[in-house]
Image: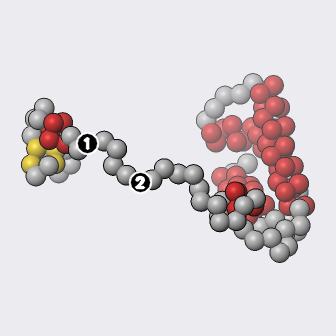
Amino acid sequence: MSDFVVANALLHFQTLLYAPHRCLPIMSLTLSDVDNLVKLAQIKLTDEQKTKTLGQLNGIFALVEQMRAVDTTGVEPLNHPIDAYQDGVALRLRDDVVSEPNRRDDYQQVAPAVQDGLYLVPQVIE
């Protein structure tokens, strides 16, 4: 499998996720595809691991197929999953307030060199 085939497979996977109403063919991989992915990823897998990986990858594609089968016509996208249950509920996030004192001067006292509140470091790129 060439880099083009891998890129095409990834593009196909993204298309399945983001355009579920398109009528795209079901994608499945073979052991030779897994062999090529293993080679491209520069990893070593036993035959048993390759077979397991093949099953897992094809399971992902089967799950995508199930998601594609759901009719989402007229369903508005959600900004947050809680919107599906309660409209207008504020997310339970803490207020953005300062909770620690500013100790920059204390921390910079032990630094070898500072200027205008900034740490000075040796130049590493010319």
Q: Dot 1, crowdedness within 10 Å: few (<14), some or many (≥20)?
A: few
Could you tell me residue 83's position as x and y percent?
70, 62
- Residue that mark 1 sits on: 101
Question: Is 37 left or right of 112, judged from the image as shown?
Answer: right
Question: Farthest bottom residue?
Answer: 74
Question: Is 63 left or right of 93, judged from the image as shown?
Answer: right
Res 86 label: none
Question: Is 46 left or right of 27, judged from the image as shown?
Answer: left
Q: Amino acid at mark 2?
A: Asp
Residue drawn where x is 64% and y is 42% of the image? 40
Question: Is 120 left or right of 2, judged from the image as shown?
Answer: left
Q: CA distance from mark 1 to mark 2?
A: 14 Å
Could you tell me residue 97's position as x and y percent?
37, 52
Res 96 label: 2
Describe the element under mark 2 as helix, strand or loop.
loop
Residue 72 in which image quadrant: bottom right
